[in-house]
Image (cartoon, rainbow, N blue to C red):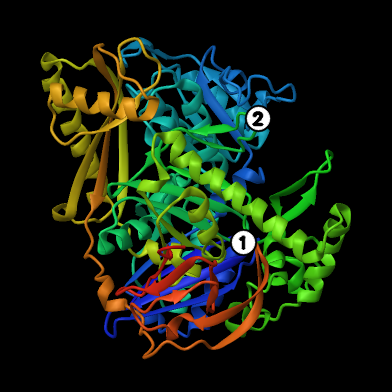
Amino acid sequence: MKLATDIGGTFTDLVYLDEETGGIGTTKASSTPPNFAQGILDTIRKADLGADAVEHFVHGTTVVINALTEHKGAKTALITTRGFRDILAIGRANRPDLYNLRFTKQPAFVPREHRYEVEERLDYLGRVVTPLDEEGVRRTAERLEVAGIEAVGICFLHSYANSDHERRCAELLGELLPEVFISISSDITKEWREYERSNTVVLNAFVQPVASRYLDNLETALRELGIGSELHIMKSNGGTSTFDLSKAQPIHLIESGPVGGVIGARAFGEALGESNLITMDVGGTTAKTSLIDDGVVKFTTEYRIEKDPHTSGYPIKIPVVDIVEIGAGGGSIAWIDEAQTLKIGPRSAGAVPGPACYGQGGDRPTVTDANLILNRINGEYFLGGEMEVDVELSRSAYRPIAEHFGVSVEEAALGVIRLADANLVNAIKLVSVRRGYDPRDFSLVAFGGGGPMHAASLARELQIGKVIIPVTPGTFSALGMLMTEPMQDFIRTRVLANTPDAIPEVRAIYEAMREEARDRLIAARYSAERIAFQLYADMRYLGQEHTVRVPVAEIDSAQLAERFHKLHEQTYTFRLDSPTEFVNFHTTALVAQDPIDLSRYVPKAGARLEAKGRREVYFDGGWLDTAIYERESLPARERVAGPCIIEEPTTTTVVHPGMEAYLDEFGNIITETRKGA
């Protein structure tokens, strides 16, 4: 049995694939902050699984992102090259909005009194200018002990080119302070940019004790439950890693949960012959969207947390699947700002107290409450009937908004849904139009508890021809985790002109990176025969500051230059007749897994089309008599016309007037605009 768990802000999801029967099973339980591991155990017990049958376990967690956004980590120090103590405070000069007079510079994660300097210096090629002052490191260790420091990040100037000084400093600190967690920047990234590297290693150190305790406790609980298989955890780059590796570099788990859905969408798209996809995952707290171009998942090393119109955020220099995340989940709260304008999020009702309809003390209007008021959600079938909700509590929560704008409660709820849709459309444009892609060339894959409810409206607004609601949409991110492979990224900065004379050195760099990757994965007990590599290069025009990432199929100067020109034109709408150069070399090492045959796990379809009932549902035109279908009762390939509602235990698919839906051969719901509509 293959099993995956995913912790969300509201629910914890579990998906399992039974290799013997070809069955697929899912379950949900409320998330259990701050002891999130309890929610995982609850789902496993609720599913009544035989733990000894689990041969593969993978987990997605929010523990790292939660610790960072809540600033609840270890007491952390930074050790850096003399003269660079204030790198975290200086940061970058860029501002999110040049004309925003309310811009504020966020404080560094490590206060100045806990930032220490030691004597050492390397040049940009990694050559020693000033040897490491080992006695200075020992004196610093004494100060760290007096200050009660729990974790240390080490980032020396140009250590991406030579890590010897960082490693020796860490070795000395480890001998003198054995209880302190120590992170070095060159272990996390060998990519240049001093401020970003310093911030990344500080954040890794900040969450390392929290993540280590979490993973240790979870592993103990899973072993006691009887699960004996290797335990994997989802990484932000779209791959997986072992618990042990992740304890050393927990910063790679910052988007651990959301990327599972992107990887799952790519796998389903491959089975369907759909290589251009936009994903939309609407959960309880946030909505996340990403783009897959020609079967390739996009990723970035320009990731930031806490970035908004008023702050630049904190950069994290690691490969992360390119996901745009906004506060527009089912639990997002609708409110009226100082200008008397309706807003949604980023504040969320979360799992506790939850939306008003939960009856757990929440009285703020949420997106879930709006859908319940409009009858798009069946109050008697919430979470398959396991959870009772009260529409009257939702209506009470929405009355202040309705009275403020002088409209009915239903119109207020519809206004919130429209605003949520508008926010989701803007998020999709950020990963498509703003990146040089036309959404009309893509299909939309919608999942999460709220994705299928909003997908049809988004597709209509963006003129996307096809919407795919995959199997188990409410737990799809967990399902996607079962389709991932162990993956490790290696990035090295080396500025070289893209000329035929430089190609031998380029080949040598890639070969050295492959060797390092192979050794690292073999040490983690992965089979050498299953290791494969994907190569990329960050390239730019001579004289430019920033780069474009170019896939490297063949190490040839002319071919790489032409591929760069095309990608640069797609991204920035122009190309130059100028020389090109390499900046960063990127090797992704993957450990091939036995592929999952999705056709084995197709849920059973119904024998004939039959609505399970009808009810009045509020659409843009008002209340409409609407047919209600159960997903598992839909026959394959038989189209149902909108307006209709397709229900299942973990979500609801809304099919608007003028649209139609059908079940494909893999059990996905396909929604399209009806011909002639």
Task: Tell me the crowding category of disc 1: few under 14, some 14 to 19, or many 20 or more residues within 10 angstroms, Cα based.
Answer: many
Q: Residue at x 54, y 62 (%)?
A: 7
For the N terminus, the quadrant is: bottom left
- Residue type at mark 2? Thr
Q: Residue at x 72, y 60 (%)?
A: 349
* Quarter occupied by residue 566: top left
- Label 2: which secondary element: loop
Q: Are marks 2 and 1 in contact (CB under 8 Å)?
A: no
- Label 1: which secondary element: loop
Residue 89: x, y in percent? 62, 21
Residue 255: x, y in percent? 48, 49
For marks 2 and 1, give the CA distance: 25 Å
Q: Residue at x 72, y 56 (%)?
A: 415
What mark, if any, has residue 284 been given in the picture?
A: 1
Q: Residue at x 40, y 64 (%)?
A: 675
* Quarter occupied by residue 587: top left
Check disc 2 and report the residue beneath it.
Answer: 311
Residue 556: x, y in percent? 12, 26
Residue farthest to the front?
676
Q: Is residue 440 above or below residue 348?
A: above
What mark, if any, has residue 584 been given in the picture?
A: none
Task: Tell me the crowding category of disc 2: few under 14, some 14 to 19, or many 20 or more residues within 10 angstroms, Cα based.
Answer: some
> Of marks 2 and 1, which one's residue comes earlier in the chain?
1
* Quarter occupied by residue 361: bottom right
- Residue type at mark 1? Gly
Is residue 649 found left or right of 57 in the rendered image?
right
Is residue 106 found left or right of 182 in the rendered image?
right
Residue farthest to the bottom?
607
Q: Is residue 480 visible?
A: yes
Is 195 in front, or is 644?
A: 644
